[in-house]
Image (spheres, rainbow, N blue to C red):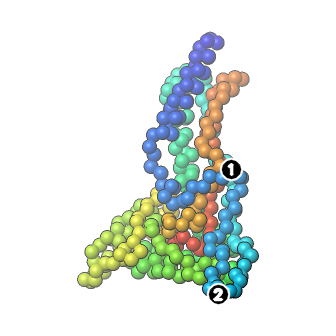
Amino acid sequence: MAGRVSDILRMTEEGVDLIFNKAVKTPQKKYYPNIVWEKKNDNRIGTYDTIGDLGAAEVKAEGSAFQFDNFEQGYQTKISVATVGKGVEASMEELEDDLYGVVNSRFGPGLYRVLLARKEKICADLYNDAFTDTGADGVALIAATHPLINSPLVNDNLATGALTTENFVAAKMKFNSIYDQSGIFFDTSPTHLLIHPNKIYTALAILESNLMAFELSNTKNVTNDVMPVRVLTNNYLDYTAATGVSPWFLLDRSIQDAGAILQIKKGLTLETWWEKNNKVFRGTLLERYGAGIVSPGYGLVGSTGA
């Protein structure tokens, strides 16, 4: 019997390594890489300064000295790392009865999938909750009144209403009124439209129709000729089936120091062991990361869709 237990343990460990590694290497549909910037950080807490903190440049008169500014600390976003994981186990009897089936179902694709789904949800919720979560500047991450440190102006990244041609164009225009912390125009423009997949037909009608969408006219549709955007869909965005309400967002994916950040401290780690007392094989799959939106008021315009 001792030899039998030893064989089961050896085959279980070998099977877990093989099946789990295969699951990780098998191509999976991932949404989050398109909506976050991944940053490697060995610290438990990452600190991110708001972009646009430097004052305006000045014209230097001939023979005069430069005026040297002291760097003024602006709004800082702190992202804390958390441990995300899942523990599974299988008894000796289960392994003896169906070694491959048990290992595959508990230590293989299913285990990897639940951690991936959790990460997808965490990243998408940065957008879902951005209308209520408070940013480093003291207002909601998506708001009409982002204060600037050295200017009475404000940045407005709050769009309104459902995804329509008019609301889409109005949201685009908000990028033309974004300022740095001194109130100087900040050059930014949308590159992507982020929506729930149930809104894809509406988005394509707005962007790709030859004539203006949803109206009886012969007006040429130039909606996507100015500041053209590509469409990103994400199943983890909120969607209310009864009303069809879903938030939508315009992103400037050319700015890596603004918007959603996925801060990674440690990648996937699988640990397994054998509990000899109760003859149970256990494993944990863990990774350590944090997520947040940095430089509030920049790189992102959004509407609740209502």
- The quarter of the picture where the N terminus appears is top right
**Picture quadrant of residue 287:** top right
- Which sits in the foreground, 208 or 54? 54
**Is residue 119 shown to the viewer in this render?**
yes
State the residue at coordinates (70%, 81%).
Answer: 66
- Along the line of sight, which residue is nearer the eye, 153 or 248? 153
Q: Position of residue 171 (x, y in %)?
A: 47, 77
Give x and y (percent) for residue 86. 62, 42
Q: Nearer the viewer, mark 1 or mark 2?
A: 2
**Amino acid at dot 1:** Asp
x, y (%) of residue 226?
Answer: 39, 77
Above or below, 145 against 80 in this view is below
Q: Is residue 275 above or below residue 180?
A: above
The CA distance from mark 1 to mark 2 is 47 Å
Q: Mark 1 or 2 closer to N-term?
A: 1
Query: Hey, which residue is sitting farthest front in the picture?
Result: 63
Query: For numbered disc 1, what is the local secondary structure?
Result: loop
Where is residue 100 drawn, in percent x and y?
49, 26
Rendered position, 206 above or below 7: below
Q: Residues within 10 Å of mark 1 (few under 14, many from 20)?
A: few
Residue shown at 67%/67% (left/top)?
A: 49
Residue that numbered label 1 is attached to:
42
Q: Which mark is residue 165?
A: none
User: Residue 73 occupies which quadrant of the picture?
Assistant: bottom right
Q: Amino acid at mark 2?
A: Glu
- Residue behind mark 2: 62
Q: Is residue 74 left or right of residue 116?
A: right
Residue 146 placement: quadrant:
bottom right
SS at badge 2: loop
In this view, the residue farthest toward the left is 218
